[in-house]
Image (tube, rainbow, N blue to C red):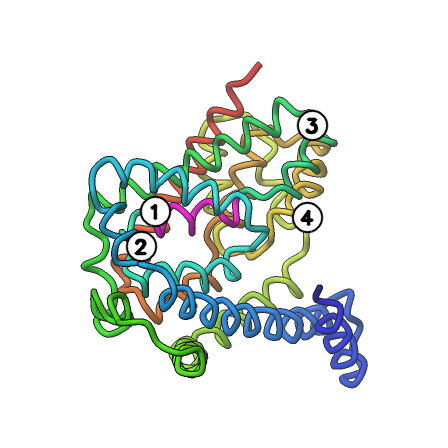
Amino acid sequence: MWTWAERTADHATRLAGLDAARGAGAALHFFVYDLQKIVVLIAVVAFVMALVRGALPLARLRRGIEGRRGRLLGYPAAAAFGALTPFCSCSSVPIFLGFVQARFPIGVAFAFLITSPLVNEIAVALMAAIFGWKLALAYTAAGIGLGIAGGLALTLLRADRWLIPGAVAPLDEGLEEPPRGWPARLRDAAGTSLSILRTIAPWLLVALALGAGLHGFVPAGFFEDWLAGTAAWTVPLATLAGFPLYVSANATVPLLEAFVTKGVPLGTALAFLLSAVGVSLPELVMLRGVMTVRLLVAFSAIVLAGTTIIGWLFNALP
């Protein structure tokens, strides 16, 4: 799907006279490739979500989810949807923004945001091939469980009060409008898409620059020697070590195998990689356009605490 973006990134790296496999060349390739991919994702998802908002009775759906029974069903539904979307943490942000703009309950939106980068069908299939289906299913359950628990925790914290004022539409804006013709809907959707792009563009560029630097200049084996112990404290250390990085779930499974082969306990390696996948500095920089620092800290703390607990549980497995 992204072959054209790969070609453009290859061309940019060649024009710069750099090697795309390492250092500055790898950083430039990452930046150019992900810039194209994420801009297209943001534009398309925002456009589609705006059309959906205009075509579906989202106010009714939202009110249904806001009830106690509906909300309890909303968390697992959002987490399951996240598990079916093969996105990294940054690529999940546009869909999360669509949920927030439609004013779905904040905890339900976060259940998607937490689960989406952690679990997808490709990563699960790779894990099953390498470690077996029992471990793959346990990993899937852990990721979805973390999404649900994180969404519930952020609901209890009333996290919607920590969204930046004006970053989302008023509660009923665009949700109860009378039917409109397709030309007007398409114009409105295009305007919404461009507005979201303008809002997060500065943060997106900073996020991609951070991700590119980490991708190009942090060696893959940099943390391995730190994590080979069996003491309980190595799991939270692994979680904190993985936090600044930016990788996709699909890339983590081969890394997980390499870590375990080098003697790193499975749970410790999993905590390191889940923290890198589940929350990253580039993602937080992108989210800063719509969230206060307090909400970013709460979101990060919940994900990092959850990955630490998952690491301990996997280390306790026979």
Tag 3 near tag 4, CB within 8 Å: no
Q: Considering only order in the chain, which callout, 4 or 1, is on the residue closer to the N terminus? A: 4
- Please give the residue where the numbered disc 4 appears in the rendered image: 221
Please tell me which residue is depicted at 52% across the width and 43% down the height of the picture: 83
Q: Considering only order in the chain, which callout, 2 or 4, is on the residue closer to the N terminus? A: 4
Does 29 sit above or below residue 78? below
Viewer-nearest of labels 3 and 2? Answer: 3
Instruction: Report how far apart the C-alphas of labels 3 and 2 lie in the structure.
Output: 33 Å
Q: Considering only order in the chain, which callout, 4 or 3, is on the residue closer to the N terminus? A: 3
Q: Main secondary structure of the magenta part?
A: helix
Instruction: Report how far apart the C-alphas of labels 1 and 4 lie in the structure.
Output: 26 Å
- Comparing 92 with 245, the one in front is 92
Is 109 part of what is drawn in magenta? Answer: yes
Instruction: Report how far apart the C-alphas of labels 1 and 2 lie in the structure.
Output: 6 Å
Tag 1 near tag 4, CB within 8 Å: no
Tag 1 near tag 2, CB within 8 Å: yes
Please tell me which residue is depicted at 51% across the width and 38% down the height of the picture: 271
Instruction: Report how far apart the C-alphas of labels 3 and 4 lie in the structure.
Output: 21 Å
- Please give the residue where the numbered disc 2 appears in the rendered image: 297
How many neighbours does mark 4 have within 10 angstroms: few (below 14), some (14-19), or many (20 or more)?
Answer: few
Q: Amino acid at mark 4?
A: Gly
Q: Is residue 66 left or right of residue 200?
A: left
Using the image, tell me which numbered label, if any, was put on residue 228: none
Q: Is residue 67 left or right of residue 167?
A: left
Q: Amino acid at mark 2?
A: Val
- Please give the residue where the numbered disc 1 appears in the rendered image: 301
How many neighbours does mark 2 have within 10 angstroms: few (below 14), some (14-19), or many (20 or more)?
Answer: few
- Please give the residue where the numbered disc 3 appears in the rendered image: 131
The region drawn magenta spans 108-118
